Protein backbone atom coordinates (compact mmCIF):
# COMPACT_ATOMS: atom_id res chain seq x y z
CA UNK A 1 0.00 0.00 0.00
CA UNK A 2 1.36 3.44 -0.92
CA UNK A 3 2.17 5.59 2.11
CA UNK A 4 3.49 9.11 2.64
CA UNK A 5 6.18 10.20 5.10
CA UNK A 6 6.17 13.92 5.93
CA UNK A 7 8.94 16.09 7.44
CA UNK A 8 8.70 19.76 8.47
CA UNK A 9 11.79 22.00 8.47
CA UNK A 10 12.45 25.49 9.81
CA UNK A 11 14.56 26.43 6.79
CA UNK A 12 14.13 25.79 3.07
CA UNK A 13 17.84 24.90 2.83
CA UNK A 14 17.33 22.12 5.39
CA UNK A 15 14.44 20.72 3.33
CA UNK A 16 16.63 20.71 0.21
CA UNK A 17 19.31 18.88 2.18
CA UNK A 18 16.72 16.30 3.25
CA UNK A 19 15.71 15.79 -0.39
CA UNK A 20 19.36 15.22 -1.30
CA UNK A 21 19.71 12.63 1.49
CA UNK A 22 16.59 10.83 0.29
CA UNK A 23 17.95 10.63 -3.24
CA UNK A 24 21.29 9.34 -1.92
CA UNK A 25 19.44 6.60 -0.04
CA UNK A 26 17.76 5.37 -3.21
CA UNK A 27 14.39 7.13 -3.05
CA UNK A 28 13.12 7.96 -6.53
CA UNK A 29 13.26 11.63 -7.50
CA UNK A 30 9.59 11.61 -8.58
CA UNK A 31 8.52 10.44 -5.10
CA UNK A 32 10.14 13.38 -3.27
CA UNK A 33 8.16 16.63 -3.01
CA UNK A 34 9.30 19.90 -1.40
CA UNK A 35 7.12 22.95 -0.86
CA UNK A 36 7.96 26.29 0.76
CA UNK A 37 7.15 29.96 0.58
CA UNK A 38 10.47 30.60 -1.21
CA UNK A 39 9.21 28.76 -4.29
CA UNK A 40 6.68 31.52 -4.91
CA UNK A 41 8.68 34.43 -3.50
CA UNK A 42 8.29 36.68 -6.56
CA UNK A 43 4.55 36.08 -6.76
CA UNK A 44 4.15 36.58 -3.03
CA UNK A 45 5.71 40.04 -3.21
CA UNK A 46 3.10 41.05 -5.75
CA UNK A 47 0.09 39.52 -3.98
CA UNK A 48 -1.74 40.83 -0.94
CA UNK A 49 -0.96 39.09 2.35
CA UNK A 50 -4.47 37.68 2.77
CA UNK A 51 -4.50 36.25 -0.74
CA UNK A 52 -1.08 34.71 -0.18
CA UNK A 53 -2.17 32.97 3.01
CA UNK A 54 -5.34 31.60 1.44
CA UNK A 55 -3.41 30.43 -1.61
CA UNK A 56 -0.74 28.87 0.55
CA UNK A 57 -3.31 26.78 2.41
CA UNK A 58 -4.73 25.58 -0.91
CA UNK A 59 -1.22 24.78 -2.14
CA UNK A 60 -0.57 22.63 0.93
CA UNK A 61 -3.86 20.77 0.40
CA UNK A 62 -2.98 20.12 -3.22
CA UNK A 63 0.54 19.20 -2.21
CA UNK A 64 -0.70 16.26 -0.18
CA UNK A 65 -3.35 15.33 -2.75
CA UNK A 66 -5.79 14.02 -0.15
CA UNK A 67 -3.20 12.13 1.90
CA UNK A 68 -3.82 14.32 4.96
CA UNK A 69 -7.52 14.62 5.67
CA UNK A 70 -7.31 16.59 8.95
CA UNK A 71 -7.80 20.30 8.13
CA UNK A 72 -6.01 21.29 11.32
CA UNK A 73 -2.98 19.19 10.35
CA UNK A 74 -2.94 20.73 6.88
CA UNK A 75 -3.24 24.14 8.52
CA UNK A 76 -0.25 23.33 10.74
CA UNK A 77 1.87 22.48 7.70
CA UNK A 78 0.65 25.66 6.02
CA UNK A 79 1.60 27.72 9.08
CA UNK A 80 5.08 26.17 9.11
CA UNK A 81 5.58 27.22 5.48
CA UNK A 82 4.10 30.68 6.13
CA UNK A 83 6.65 31.19 8.91
CA UNK A 84 9.51 30.58 6.49
CA UNK A 85 9.81 26.80 6.80
CA UNK A 86 9.36 24.02 4.28
CA UNK A 87 7.59 20.66 4.05
CA UNK A 88 9.02 17.51 2.48
CA UNK A 89 6.77 14.56 1.62
CA UNK A 90 7.96 11.16 0.41
CA UNK A 91 5.68 8.67 -1.33
CA UNK A 92 6.64 5.12 -0.34
CA UNK A 93 5.53 1.81 -1.89
CA UNK A 94 7.87 -0.60 -0.07
CA UNK A 95 7.62 -1.00 3.68
CA UNK A 96 11.42 -1.06 4.29
CA UNK A 97 11.77 2.34 2.60
CA UNK A 98 9.55 3.96 5.24
CA UNK A 99 12.26 3.66 7.89
CA UNK A 100 14.89 4.81 5.38
CA UNK A 101 12.88 7.94 4.59
CA UNK A 102 12.13 8.63 8.25
CA UNK A 103 15.81 8.32 9.19
CA UNK A 104 16.87 10.63 6.35
CA UNK A 105 14.33 13.32 7.36
CA UNK A 106 15.40 13.16 11.02
CA UNK A 107 19.08 13.34 10.03
CA UNK A 108 18.39 16.50 8.04
CA UNK A 109 16.80 18.17 11.09
CA UNK A 110 13.05 17.63 10.74
CA UNK A 111 11.18 19.32 13.61
CA UNK A 112 8.37 17.93 15.77
CA UNK A 113 5.28 19.58 14.27
CA UNK A 114 3.23 18.90 17.42
CA UNK A 115 5.75 20.83 19.53
CA UNK A 116 5.72 23.68 17.01
CA UNK A 117 1.92 23.83 17.12
CA UNK A 118 2.01 24.12 20.93
CA UNK A 119 4.52 26.98 20.65
CA UNK A 120 2.34 28.77 18.10
CA UNK A 121 -0.74 28.32 20.25
CA UNK A 122 1.11 29.83 23.21
CA UNK A 123 1.80 32.82 20.97
CA UNK A 124 -1.86 33.22 20.01
CA UNK A 125 -2.19 31.04 16.93
CA UNK A 126 -5.46 29.09 16.83
CA UNK A 127 -5.30 27.17 13.56
CA UNK A 128 -7.69 27.35 10.59
CA UNK A 129 -10.24 29.54 12.32
CA UNK A 130 -7.69 32.29 12.84
CA UNK A 131 -6.47 32.13 9.28
CA UNK A 132 -10.01 32.22 7.92
CA UNK A 133 -10.72 35.37 9.94
CA UNK A 134 -7.77 37.13 8.33
CA UNK A 135 -9.25 36.70 4.87
CA UNK A 136 -12.24 38.91 5.75
CA UNK A 137 -10.73 42.33 5.11
CA UNK A 138 -7.46 42.20 7.03
CA UNK A 139 -4.09 42.76 5.45
CA UNK A 140 -1.17 41.27 7.33
CA UNK A 141 2.47 42.32 7.39
CA UNK A 142 4.47 39.41 8.81
CA UNK A 143 7.19 40.56 11.20
CA UNK A 144 10.10 38.22 10.58
CA UNK A 145 13.14 37.85 12.79
CA UNK A 146 16.00 35.58 11.81
CA UNK A 147 17.73 33.51 14.45
CA UNK A 148 21.25 32.19 14.13
CA UNK A 149 21.30 28.42 14.61
CA UNK A 150 24.73 26.87 14.89
CA UNK A 151 25.10 23.12 14.54
CA UNK A 152 28.01 20.85 13.89
CA UNK A 153 28.85 17.92 11.67
CA UNK A 154 31.71 15.47 11.50
CA UNK A 155 34.00 15.66 8.48
CA UNK A 156 37.06 13.64 7.56
CA UNK A 157 40.31 15.37 8.47
CA UNK A 158 42.84 12.70 7.47
CA UNK A 159 43.78 9.55 9.32
CA UNK A 160 46.44 6.94 10.00
CA UNK A 161 46.86 3.48 8.46
CA UNK A 162 49.14 0.95 10.17
CA UNK A 163 50.44 -2.04 8.19
CA UNK A 164 52.12 -5.11 9.81
CA UNK A 165 54.27 -7.56 7.78
CA UNK A 166 56.98 -10.20 8.43
CA UNK A 167 60.50 -9.55 7.13
CA UNK A 168 63.69 -11.65 7.31
CA UNK A 169 67.11 -10.36 8.25
CA UNK A 170 70.49 -12.04 8.57
CA UNK A 171 71.81 -12.45 12.13
CA UNK A 172 75.38 -13.46 13.06
CA UNK A 173 76.28 -14.79 16.53
CA UNK A 174 79.53 -16.27 17.94
CA UNK A 175 79.69 -19.38 20.16
CA UNK A 176 82.68 -21.17 21.82
CA UNK A 177 82.89 -24.88 20.88
CA UNK A 178 84.96 -27.49 22.80
CA UNK A 179 86.74 -30.48 21.23
CA UNK A 180 88.35 -33.54 22.94
CA UNK A 181 90.86 -35.41 20.77
CA UNK A 182 92.86 -38.60 21.61
CA UNK A 183 96.56 -38.01 22.01
CA UNK A 184 99.23 -40.77 21.67
CA UNK A 185 102.71 -39.86 22.81
CA UNK A 186 105.88 -41.96 22.82
CA UNK A 187 108.58 -41.10 25.34
CA UNK A 188 112.01 -42.75 25.46
CA UNK A 189 112.70 -44.34 28.86
CA UNK A 190 115.79 -46.21 30.18
CA UNK A 191 115.25 -47.79 33.62
CA UNK A 192 115.12 -51.28 35.18
CA UNK A 193 111.72 -53.00 34.68
CA UNK A 194 109.69 -53.52 37.79
CA UNK A 195 107.14 -56.20 38.51
CA UNK A 196 104.43 -53.66 37.73
CA UNK A 197 106.03 -52.96 34.41
CA UNK A 198 106.12 -56.66 33.68
CA UNK A 199 102.46 -57.04 34.61
CA UNK A 200 101.50 -54.04 32.43
CA UNK A 201 103.43 -55.41 29.52
CA UNK A 202 101.01 -58.30 29.16
CA UNK A 203 98.43 -58.11 26.38
CA UNK A 204 95.96 -55.24 26.92
CA UNK A 205 94.14 -52.40 25.09
CA UNK A 206 93.27 -48.80 25.99
CA UNK A 207 90.45 -46.88 24.34
CA UNK A 208 90.04 -43.09 24.51
CA UNK A 209 86.81 -41.46 23.23
CA UNK A 210 87.01 -38.24 21.34
CA UNK A 211 84.19 -35.60 21.69
CA UNK A 212 83.39 -32.52 19.58
CA UNK A 213 80.78 -29.74 20.21
CA UNK A 214 78.67 -28.62 17.26
CA UNK A 215 76.52 -25.43 17.08
CA UNK A 216 72.81 -26.02 17.70
CA UNK A 217 70.41 -23.32 16.45
CA UNK A 218 66.95 -22.76 17.93
CA UNK A 219 64.54 -19.90 17.32
CA UNK A 220 62.18 -18.49 19.93
CA UNK A 221 59.68 -15.64 19.36
CA UNK A 222 59.29 -12.88 21.93
CA UNK A 223 57.07 -9.80 21.91
CA UNK A 224 59.36 -6.82 22.25
CA UNK A 225 56.98 -3.92 21.44
CA UNK A 226 53.28 -3.12 20.93
CA UNK A 227 51.87 -0.65 18.44
CA UNK A 228 48.49 0.60 19.70
CA UNK A 229 46.19 2.24 17.14
CA UNK A 230 43.22 4.21 18.42
CA UNK A 231 41.69 7.70 18.63
CA UNK A 232 41.66 10.36 21.29
CA UNK A 233 38.92 13.01 21.41
CA UNK A 234 39.54 16.60 22.32
CA UNK A 235 37.09 19.51 22.47
CA UNK A 236 37.66 23.03 21.30
CA UNK A 237 35.46 26.09 21.01
CA UNK A 238 34.69 27.68 17.65
CA UNK A 239 33.24 31.19 17.38
CA UNK A 240 30.66 31.60 14.60
CA UNK A 241 29.77 35.08 13.39
CA UNK A 242 27.03 35.91 10.91
CA UNK A 243 24.29 38.46 10.33
CA UNK A 244 20.56 38.01 10.92
CA UNK A 245 17.68 40.11 9.67
CA UNK A 246 14.40 41.22 11.21
CA UNK A 247 11.41 43.19 10.04
CA UNK A 248 10.80 46.70 11.32
CA UNK A 249 7.32 48.14 10.87
CA UNK A 250 6.79 51.91 11.22
CA UNK A 251 3.24 53.18 11.70
CA UNK A 252 2.55 56.74 10.56
CA UNK A 253 -0.59 58.84 10.63
CA UNK A 254 -0.88 60.60 7.28
CA UNK A 255 -4.03 62.63 8.03
CA UNK A 256 -4.34 66.36 7.30
CA UNK A 257 -4.84 67.67 10.89
CA UNK A 258 -1.96 69.03 12.99
CA UNK A 259 -1.67 65.94 15.19
CA UNK A 260 -1.50 63.65 12.18
CA UNK A 261 1.23 65.48 10.28
CA UNK A 262 3.34 63.19 8.14
CA UNK A 263 6.58 62.21 9.81
CA UNK A 264 8.60 63.81 7.02
CA UNK A 265 7.26 67.26 7.94
CA UNK A 266 7.84 66.57 11.61
CA UNK A 267 11.38 65.43 10.85
CA UNK A 268 12.30 68.66 9.06
CA UNK A 269 11.00 70.76 11.94
CA UNK A 270 12.73 68.73 14.59
CA UNK A 271 16.19 68.81 13.00
CA UNK A 272 16.28 72.60 13.45
CA UNK A 273 16.15 72.53 17.26
CA UNK A 274 17.85 69.13 17.84
CA UNK A 275 21.27 70.45 18.89
CA UNK A 276 19.76 73.32 20.87
CA UNK A 277 17.51 71.05 22.93
CA UNK A 278 19.96 68.23 23.61
CA UNK A 279 23.39 69.75 22.97
CA UNK A 280 24.57 66.33 21.85
CA UNK A 281 27.69 65.83 19.80
CA UNK A 282 26.30 62.66 18.18
CA UNK A 283 24.79 63.13 14.70
CA UNK A 284 21.05 63.49 14.34
CA UNK A 285 20.89 60.24 12.35
CA UNK A 286 21.85 58.28 15.49
CA UNK A 287 18.65 59.46 17.16
CA UNK A 288 16.36 59.50 14.12
CA UNK A 289 14.89 56.00 14.92
CA UNK A 290 13.96 57.28 18.39
CA UNK A 291 12.15 60.31 16.97
CA UNK A 292 10.33 58.17 14.43
CA UNK A 293 9.35 55.73 17.19
CA UNK A 294 8.11 58.54 19.45
CA UNK A 295 6.06 60.00 16.61
CA UNK A 296 4.42 56.60 16.02
CA UNK A 297 3.46 56.36 19.72
CA UNK A 298 1.40 59.52 19.39
CA UNK A 299 -0.75 57.90 16.68
CA UNK A 300 -0.99 54.47 18.32
CA UNK A 301 -4.44 53.81 19.75
CA UNK A 302 -2.95 51.73 22.56
CA UNK A 303 -1.41 54.86 24.08
CA UNK A 304 -4.29 57.26 23.48
CA UNK A 305 -5.19 59.33 26.54
CA UNK A 306 -2.20 58.12 28.60
CA UNK A 307 0.53 60.31 30.07
CA UNK A 308 4.20 59.48 29.75
CA UNK A 309 4.64 57.98 33.24
CA UNK A 310 1.76 55.56 32.62
CA UNK A 311 2.94 54.41 29.23
CA UNK A 312 6.75 54.46 29.50
CA UNK A 313 7.08 50.81 30.58
CA UNK A 314 4.98 49.57 27.64
CA UNK A 315 6.80 51.88 25.23
CA UNK A 316 10.13 50.53 26.43
CA UNK A 317 8.99 46.94 25.70
CA UNK A 318 7.89 47.94 22.17
CA UNK A 319 11.23 49.69 21.65
CA UNK A 320 13.17 46.56 22.74
CA UNK A 321 11.20 44.44 20.27
CA UNK A 322 11.70 46.90 17.41
CA UNK A 323 15.34 47.79 18.12
CA UNK A 324 17.00 44.95 19.99
CA UNK A 325 20.41 45.90 21.34
CA UNK A 326 19.65 49.65 21.48
CA UNK A 327 19.77 51.18 24.98
CA UNK A 328 16.45 52.66 26.07
CA UNK A 329 18.08 54.97 28.64
CA UNK A 330 20.04 56.71 25.85
CA UNK A 331 17.04 57.12 23.57
CA UNK A 332 14.02 57.65 25.80
CA UNK A 333 14.48 61.45 26.01
CA UNK A 334 14.34 61.71 22.21
CA UNK A 335 11.36 59.30 22.10
CA UNK A 336 9.45 61.36 24.67
CA UNK A 337 10.22 64.66 22.97
CA UNK A 338 8.98 63.33 19.61
CA UNK A 339 5.86 61.92 21.30
CA UNK A 340 5.09 65.28 22.97
CA UNK A 341 5.62 67.27 19.77
CA UNK A 342 3.48 64.91 17.69
CA UNK A 343 0.62 65.28 20.21
CA UNK A 344 0.83 69.04 20.38
Image (cartoon, grey):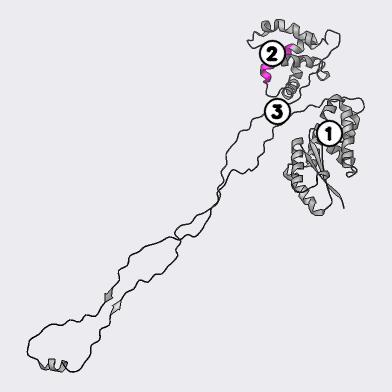
Q: Point out the tag, 2 or 1, that comes first from the N-terminus.
A: 1
Is residue 110 at all visible to an observer of this figure? no
Direction right: furthest residue: 136
Please tell me in which quadrant of the rendered image residue 220 appears. bottom left
Q: Nearer the viewer, residue 78 or 217?
A: 217
User: Which residue carries the number 3 mark?
Assistant: 244
- Foreground mark, 3 or 1, reads 3
Label 3 and label 1: CA atoms lie apart by: 25 Å
Q: Position of residue 37 (x, y in %)?
A: 82, 32
Q: Is residue 104 left or right of residue 200?
A: right
Q: Is residue 168 left or right of residue 62?
A: left
Q: Secondary structure at mark 2?
A: helix
Q: Mark 2 and mark 1: span between their CA atoms? A: 37 Å
Res. 340 visible in picture? yes
The vertical placement of 273 against 129, above or below, is above
Task: Look at mark 2 in the image and give the residue it sits on.
Answer: 285
Q: Does residue 85 show up magenta in the picture?
A: no
N-terminal of the two: label 3 or label 1?
1
Q: Which residue is mark 1?
A: 125
Q: Residue at x 80, y 46 (%)?
A: 28
Which numbered dot is residue 246? none
Q: Quadrant of the C terminus?
A: top right
Q: Is residue 32 above or below residue 255?
A: below
In depth, the one of 177 and 76 nearer the eye is 177
Amino acid sequence: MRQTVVGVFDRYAAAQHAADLLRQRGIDEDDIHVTSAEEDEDAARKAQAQQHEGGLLEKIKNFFSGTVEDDFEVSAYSEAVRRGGAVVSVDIDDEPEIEVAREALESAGAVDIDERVEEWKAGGWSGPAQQAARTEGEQVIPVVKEELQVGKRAVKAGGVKVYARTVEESVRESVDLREERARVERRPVDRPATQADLSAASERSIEVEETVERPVVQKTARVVEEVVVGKEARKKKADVQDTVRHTEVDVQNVGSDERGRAYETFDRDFRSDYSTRFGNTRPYEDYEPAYRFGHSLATDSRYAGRDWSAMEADAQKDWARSYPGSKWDEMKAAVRHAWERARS
